[in-house]
Image (tube, grey):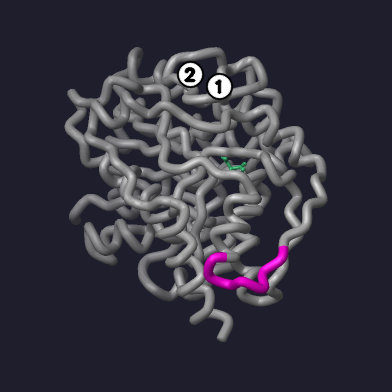
Amino acid sequence: MSSKILIIGACGQIGTELTLKLREIHGVDNVIASDINTRKLDLVNAGPFVILDAKNFNAIKDCCINHNVDTVYLMAALLSATGEKYPMEAWDLNMNSLFHVLNLAKVGQIKKVFWPSSIAVFGPTTPRENTPQHTICEPTTVYGITKQVGERWCEYYHDKYGVDVRSLRYPGIISHKAMPGGGTTDYAVEIYHEAIKEKKYESFLSENTKLPMMFMDDAIAATTELMAAPPENITIRSSYNLSAISFTPQDVANSIKAEIPEFTMTYNPDFRQAIADSWPSSIDDAVARKDWNWDHQFNLSRMTEVMLKNLHVKYN
Ligand code: AKB
C-alpha cells in the first residue's frame, strides 16, 4: 500500500484548500481529509474522508495505521478570538492535538509533520514593524500562548527525537472558498463577501489597524514548498516567519471601492481590537526566503480582483 497524507481539520479555512492542492499534487486517493464532523459535504464527497477528533490520540493513531499515513498536516485549532472566549478548550485542542501527532512521529509511526503557527506568537513587547524571525515573543492571547509553546515543542521534538516537523507563522489568510472562523483577521474575508452581497461592511477593527495578511494561494504555496524542501535547507524547526502584504481595513475598503464605487465601510471595534493591537503590522521573513526560496505572488489589488470575481460568481 502506498504511503498517504492525513489532513486533520480539513474542513477549516486553510484545510479545505490545502486538501484540494495536495490531492492535485499527490493524487486524490493519497490524501485523506479528516475533521470532527462532515460540515463540508463537497469535501467529504470528493475523496477519502474520515471523521476524526484531533484530541483523540488513539483515533489519530488508528487512522495512521489503517491508511498507512506517513505525513500529517495538523490544521485543527481554536483561533485567537474564539480562544479568548474558551481558553481551556483552546489550550486542550491546540496543545493535545500537537502532542498526539508529535508523539506518533517520535515513535516512527509517521515520518513528517506540518503544524501551523501564527503571528499571534508575538505580543505588545515585540518590535511591530518588520518583526524579525528571532525576537521577543510575549503573546497576550491564549491562542498565541498555545502557538508559542507549540513552537518550542516542535523544536524540542526535532532536536531530541529527530522528528521532521515543519511550521509557518501564518499571517491573516484571505480566501473565497471557505470562511475562516474565530480569528481576529477574519474581517479581511468577511468584507469581500459583504461587498458583493450588501455593498457595505462594518469592520470590527479600526480603520488604521495594520496587520500582516496573505492571499490563500500564497499560503498554500508556502506550505507545500516548505514541506517539499530538502531537510538540510530547513534551519528553523520552531516556525518560520512568513510575509506577503500588510494593510489596514481602510486599505481593503479603498481597494474594493476601486472595483465597486458604491461600497461603504463603517467601523465599530470590539474586543478583537485589543488582540490586533498586540500583533505586529509587518513581518520580516528573510530566513524563509533564503532557506527554501519563499516568494509571494499576490498584492492587495490583485487579491481584491480575484476575491471579487470569484465571490461575484458565487452569489450571482
Ligand atoms: C487569527 O486571526 O486568529 C488567525 C491568525 C492570525 O492566526 N487568522
Q: Nearer the viewer, residue 93 or 282?
A: 282
Residue shown at 75%/50% (left/top)? 204
Q: Looking at the picture, how far across and down is residue 120, in whole percent?
A: 59, 31
Ligand 1: quadrant of the figure: top right
- Tell me if mark 1 has few (under 14), some (14-19) or many (20+) residues whose alpha carbon lies within 10 angstroms of its own: some
Check disc 2 and report its element: helix, strand or loop. Answer: helix
Check disc 1 and report its element: helix, strand or loop. Answer: helix
Q: Name the amino acid, label 2.
A: Arg
Q: Is residue 123 magenta?
A: no
Residue shown at 70%/24% (left/top)? 140
Q: CA distance from mark 2 to mark 1?
A: 5 Å
Q: Are marks 2 and 1 in contact (CB under 8 Å)?
A: yes
Q: Looking at the picture, how far across and down is residue 64, in whole percent?
A: 36, 47
Residue shown at 57%/23% (left/top)? 128
User: In the picture provided, is 222 more to the left or to the right than 100?
Assistant: left
Which quadrant of the structure image shows residue 141? top right
User: In the picture provided, is 219 more to the left or to the right than 100?
Assistant: left
Indicate which disc residue 149 carries.
1
User: In the picture provided, is 209 more to the left or to the right than 52?
Assistant: right
Tell me which secondary structure the magenta stretch mostly adopts: loop
Q: Name the amino acid, label 1.
A: Val
Q: Looking at the picture, how far across and down is residue 203, in whole percent?
A: 73, 54
Residue shown at 48%/18% (left/top)? 152
Q: Looking at the picture, how far across and down is residue 167, in whole percent?
A: 39, 33
Tell me, yes or no, if residue 218 can be seen here.
Answer: yes
Which quadrant of the structure image shows residue 194? bottom right
Please say if 257 is above or below 208: below
What residue would you read off at disc 2?
152
Residue with the most extreme bottom position: 316
Q: Nearer the viewer, residue 290 or 252?
A: 252
Mark 2 residue's CB less than 8 Å from ligand 1: no
Start and end of the magenta stretch? 258-264
